[in-house]
């Protein structure tokens, strides 16, 4: 009998929620047929059957949160494509197709997924960490000890008042909690605010497209904010392509898909990409690859409410632009007070690697582009 463990579904994610099982104990299954749908990093991912055999047990129920590398399902007989199923609790499956013969001195192969994920977030070199597991396997405790961080302690639960009910954070909300905690712990944030006078626009609406165009212009004027911060090497990695993470509000929580290489897209291509990602976000059909590796972030929260805000940067990115609600403001023009439509802007940045001057130049370039008539 073999046990298949939840694979790393992308970017060292530490857990996933079981949404639906497509098999049950007693089923005879074949390689690559649908096995289970899980939600992780705000995306729904379908995990295929890793090898042919008979299902003997499901290790989790719908709604359960399963850690990456934890037992997911048991099979009787059958062979993994290219390998045998891992049964030791200290082995892990990196993908649904497991490969034999990975050298044990490979740091990536010597770390359990949650340890690898935490090491990546902290900017640590796994090769410099001594593992306490079998054959030098690196565990989470090893990474935390190397970083001089105490292991996690379970907080005392709050007493639920009469008439109230506890709602566990799941899916997108759980991923948001993780991202915001990471931002709190890793980013030295600062925010600068200003307004763009858009009274001269010849066509109203299409705010998202104009914001994206302005951010592209700002990246040309001040490239420093289209970047990653590498904590391990204390360096800033300047990016040429602009991969923009776009916050989308959905009933299930905040989804942040990525618009790829926006610098080279035409307005029509941008409109199509925005519409496609918004639809995918609401249908919960976004691929995991479309939720990561962004170089810059945008939150157009003004479509709902709010004038200014303090958007939070998610590392390794270094900047996020927030756009508030457009409204009529009193401005002085030619010695008279008149009403103009203005868009409030809030630019948050990681002050570890971005100076106030760089942030202000970027924001000024955004405003300059937004204030063009068309």
Image (tube, grey):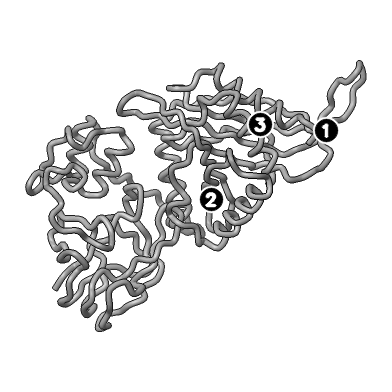
Horizontal placement of 128 versus 25: left or right? left
Secondary element under disc 3, as helix, strand or loop, is: strand
| Residue name at image x 57 percent, y 54 percent | 277
Name the residue tied to disc 1.
199
Tag 3 and tag 2, C-beta contact below 8 Å: no
Q: Which mark is residue 254?
A: 2
Residue 142 % position (x, y) = 17, 39
| Residue name at image x 66 percent, y 38 percent | 211
Upstream in the sequence, badge 3 or badge 2?
2
Is residue 90 or residue 79 the one in the foreground?
Answer: 79
- The span from disc 1 to disc 2 (Cα, nearest Å) is 31 Å
Q: Which mark is residue 345?
A: 3
Residue 64 % position (x, y) = 35, 63
Q: Which mark is residue 107?
A: none
Tag 1 and tag 2, C-beta contact below 8 Å: no
Horizontal placement of 303 versus 49: left or right? right
| Residue name at image x 46 percent, y 49 percent | 291
| Residue name at image x 22 percent, y 66 percent | 4
Against 160, residue 2 (above or below) is below
Residue 294 % position (x, y) = 47, 41
- The span from disc 1 to disc 3 (Cα, nearest Å) is 15 Å
Upstream in the sequence, badge 1 or badge 2?
1
């Amino acid at each position: 009998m073999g046990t298949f463990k939840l694979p790393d579904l992308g970017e060292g994610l530490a857990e996933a929620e079981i949404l639906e099982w497509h098999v049950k104990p007693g089923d005879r299954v074949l390689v690559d047929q649908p096995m289970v749908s899980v939600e992780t990093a705000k995306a729904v991912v379908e995990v295929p059957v890793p090898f042919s055999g008979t299902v003997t047990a499901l290790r989790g129920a719908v709604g359960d949160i399963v850690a990456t590398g934890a037992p997911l399902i048991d099979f009787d007989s059958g062979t993994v494509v290219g390998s045998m199923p891992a049964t030791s609790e200290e082995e892990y499956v990196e993908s649904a197709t497991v490969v034999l013969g990975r050298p044990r001195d490979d740091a990536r192969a010597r770390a359990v997924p949650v340890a690898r994920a935490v090491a990546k977030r902290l900017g640590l070199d796994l090769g410099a960490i001594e593992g306490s597991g079998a054959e030098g396997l690196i565990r989470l405790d090893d990474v935390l000890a190397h970083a001089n961080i105490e292991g996690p302690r379970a907080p005392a639960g709050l007493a639920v008042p009469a008439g109230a009910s506890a709602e566990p954070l799941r899916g997108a909300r759980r991923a948001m909690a993780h991202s915001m905690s990471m931002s709190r712990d890793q980013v030295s944030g600062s925010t600068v605010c200003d307004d763009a006078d858009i009274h001269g626009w010849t066509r109203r609406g299409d705010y998202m497209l104009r914001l994206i165009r302005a951010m592209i212009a700002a990246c040309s004027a001040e490239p420093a904010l289209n970047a990653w911060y590498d904590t391990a090497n204390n360096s800033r990695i300047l990016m040429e392509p602009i991969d923009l993470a776009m916050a989308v509000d959905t009933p299930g929580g905040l989804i942040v898909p990525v618009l790829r290489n926006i610098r080279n897209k035409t307005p029509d291509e941008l409109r199509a990409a925005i519409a496609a990602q918004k639809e995918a976000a609401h249908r919960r059909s976004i691929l995991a690859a479309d939720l990561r590796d962004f170089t810059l972030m945008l939150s157009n929260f003004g479509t709902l409410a709010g004038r200014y805000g303090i958007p939070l940067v998610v590392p390794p990115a270094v900047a996020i632009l927030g756009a508030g609600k457009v409204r009529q403001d009193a401005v002085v023009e030619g010695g008279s007070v008149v009403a103009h439509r203005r868009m409030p802007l809030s630019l948050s940045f990681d002050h570890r690697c971005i100076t106030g001057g760089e942030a202000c130049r970027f924001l000024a370039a955004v405003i300059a582009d937004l204030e063009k008539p068309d």
